[in-house]
Amino acid sequence: MKIVVCAKQVPDTEATMTVEDGKIGWGEAQLIINPWDEYAVEAALNLTADHGGDVVVLSMGAEDETEAIKHALAMGAGDAVLVSDPALAGADNVATAKILAAAIQKIGEVDLVLFGQQSVDTVTGLLPVQVARVLGWPALLLVSQFDEVDPEAGTLQVKRTLEEGKQIVEGKFPAVLSVTKDYAEPRYPSFMGIRKASRAKYPAWGLADLEMEAPASVVSWTGVSVPPQREIVSEIIAGETPEEKAKNLVAKIMEEKVL
Amino acid sequence: MMTKNILVFIDNFKGEVQLSSWEALGVGRSLAGGGGKVSALILGHEVEDLAEAAFQYGADEVFLADAPALGDYRPEPWADVTVQVARDAAAAGNAVDVMLFPTTTRGREIAGMAAVDLETGVLVDVVDLRVEDGSVVATRPIYAGKLLSEVKCEASPQIITLRGRAFAAPEADPSLGGEPTLVSVELSPGEIATSVAGYEAKGGGVSLKDAAVIVSGGRGTSNNPLLSPPGDLDDDEQEIWKAQQGFELVEELADVLGAAVGASRAAVDANYIPYEYQVGQTGKVVSPDLYIACGISGAIQHLAGMRTSKVIVAINKDADAPIFKLARFGVVGDLFEVLPPLTEGLREALG
Ligand SMILES: Cc1cc2nc3c(=O)[nH]c(=O)nc-3n(C[C@H](O)[C@H](O)[C@H](O)COP(=O)(O)OP(=O)(O)OC[C@H]3O[C@@H](n4cnc5c(N)ncnc54)[C@H](O)[C@@H]3O)c2cc1C
Ligand SMILES: Nc1ncnc2c1ncn2[C@@H]1O[C@H](COP(=O)(O)O)[C@@H](O)[C@H]1O
């Protein structure tokens, strides 16, 4: 079974974000794999451990945006592809979906494509469904559990998350999935894994390798800003005993007229 | 481009509407202005009743696609029908200028697929918007709300998903009504690539995303040395047992307030409560009128999920906990001691 995991690099979630001259910065903060994507890597590794096969991590980004690939390789993914081309800077979601879909086609004979739920930086959560649409493969999204996977028959049954609860869905290979956080805790990379990942060689494909032009992007950013600091007047509720504090808090909450 | 034809997706699960759909209809009304037209789109099976509600919330026209094949939601057929409605409107000379969706699971999926088919883009989880030169410029939080970006879409229709509770819901007017326009659905259930084998309902209670009040518990819910768990439990089980007593207090307060229950990631990771309750950067982003954090330290990733709450109340033993910086009101104290009298006091105050 061949599984592609799509993953990207983002600034650490603790980072203080800044904007200068319209450019986003994160100071000295580390770059990490998008935390949601670790769950997809974990699922891919478990699926191939149980049923055999290979995991290829696929990331689109600038030449040096390789943190997601390194982390996924260190977790145990066998192979990686970076898609990088200066003409792809500023690509919107649909354009990115077309590129990832083309790379998945070029990787070839892919059974499942796994995504994280969303990116912690741009938080759109669109790529999994859009890549599925571009490829014309079924989308099984927000999966928390794999009930059955049968690579021989090319079928699977998963539990996916809706607002109202879990939906149990059956589908056929090839399919596109996204994996949620309640799937399982992702493993930590082993020391050996980290060493292997630091020496790993993998291809970087440009648009020419994908035999395509940069797809048109229609969504553009017209501005980015740090939201105004909210003025919060904090007040510690006084009281000798917990009961007294509770009583004083009730009065304060009622005054706010939010109930 | 003039913003005049607005199509609003009314999200429902087997006839039960996600309330943020009505907020989207309200936004549609204000974008359409006087001369424009707001159409609601309802998909599903045996969901005719929703058409009337859509008229009452202000739709000028209601497209109803009611078919057995749409009974169990799958993104592909629902997106197919949505795209067909947009294409038919364009063919009839009434091209849709803006498509609005609530930012729900289904809303996001269908918006994403429709953008691919219609060769346009999606502005996701928008919290504010304005019209400039006839086209929508939207504001959306990025980097867990640490930054705001302004985005626009140069193609038409502009597809936009709206964050729940960021826009006011219109009042339903029971005097309004109309006949829905039926959309024919030429799909048989067998043509759909996936099939639904069943559902697992989740625990009841108020949904986090729609809640006006949320009471959340963190790791502090397990910290009560006075409790003595049954002796046959191992350490982890004892901790979970204790946390259950803590979350019982959280739930009692939530009950009195008609509030939803939330949790920190530490509480979820330690198996005190399922993931669907997690608030934060890798959980749900919420924006209630009142958020009460009990035994939560206020890590940046938790704050990312609730910092836009109108009034934040924190109950924490540690006077230096970062949550107090964001809290309008803080109580330095043990949640096991503070919550019972707080629940009682609010019960009395609310009659
Ligand atoms: C990539 C990433 C994503 C993350 N996403 C999220 C997310 O979505 N949501 C989230 O919440 N976290 C998230 N986190 C985790 C976050 O960093 C914190 O670890 C977590 O929020 C801590 O939860 P907590 O406040 O319940 O626990 P703690 O930090 O352990 O705090 C417990 C608090 O309870 C207080 N306390 C103890 N006993 C009592 C008592 N009896 N009465 C009153 N107070 C008491 C303590 O003083 C303390 O302040 C994420 C982390 C990472 C790295
Ligand atoms: N540049 C990228 N390269 C590869 N995969 C990506 C990229 N951006 C996003 N993804 C994947 O798409 C998912 C959803 O991202 P998004 O639609 O940006 O929120 C992420 O969790 C990743 O799995």
Image (cartoon, rainbow, N blue to C red):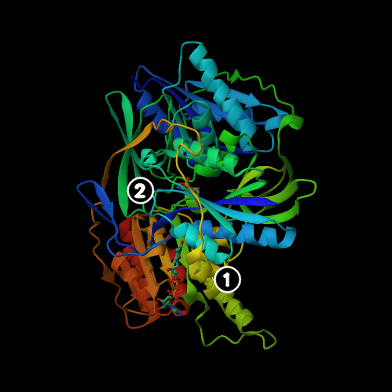
Residue A203, percent from left and from top: 50, 50
Q: What kind of element bears circle 2? A: strand
Residue closest to the eye, B60 or B256: B60
Classify residue B91 as left or right of residue A141.
left
Q: Is residue B351 visible?
A: no
Can residue B343 be seen in the rendering of this structure?
yes
Which residue does the numbered mark 2 point to in the structure image? B141
Instruction: Give me the residue at 54% from left, 44% from top.
Output: A128
Residue at the image point whose x is 38% and y is 31% from the top? A218
The residues bearing labels 2 and 1 have C-alpha atoms spaced at a distance of: 30 Å
Q: Position of residue B292 (x, y in %)?
A: 41, 64
The residue lying furthest to the top in this view is B92
Q: Say which of B3 and B221 sits in front.
A: B3
Residue A14 relative to residue A145: left or right: left
Residue B190, quarter of picture:
top right
Question: Which quarter shows the C terminus of chain B?
Answer: bottom left
**Camera-nearest label, 2 or 1:** 2
Q: Residues within 10 Å of mark 2 (few under 14, many from 20)?
A: many
Residue B44 locus on image (x, y percent): 64, 32
The residue that disc 1 covers is: B272
Q: Position of residue A20 (x, y in %)?
A: 21, 51
Other-residue count near label 1 (Cα within 10 Å), few / some / many at <14 / 14–19 / ≥20: many
* Circle 1: element type: loop
* Residue projecting furthest to the right: A153
The quadrant in which residue B58 appears is: top left
Determine the residue positioned at 38% across, 44% down.
Answer: B166
> What is the chain identity of the residue bearing mark 2?
B
* Mark 2 vs 1, N-terminal side: 2
The type of residue carrying mark 2 is Pro
Looking at numbered disc 1 in the image, what kind of residue is underneath it?
A: Tyr
Does mark 2's beta carbon lie closer than 8 Å to ligand 2? no
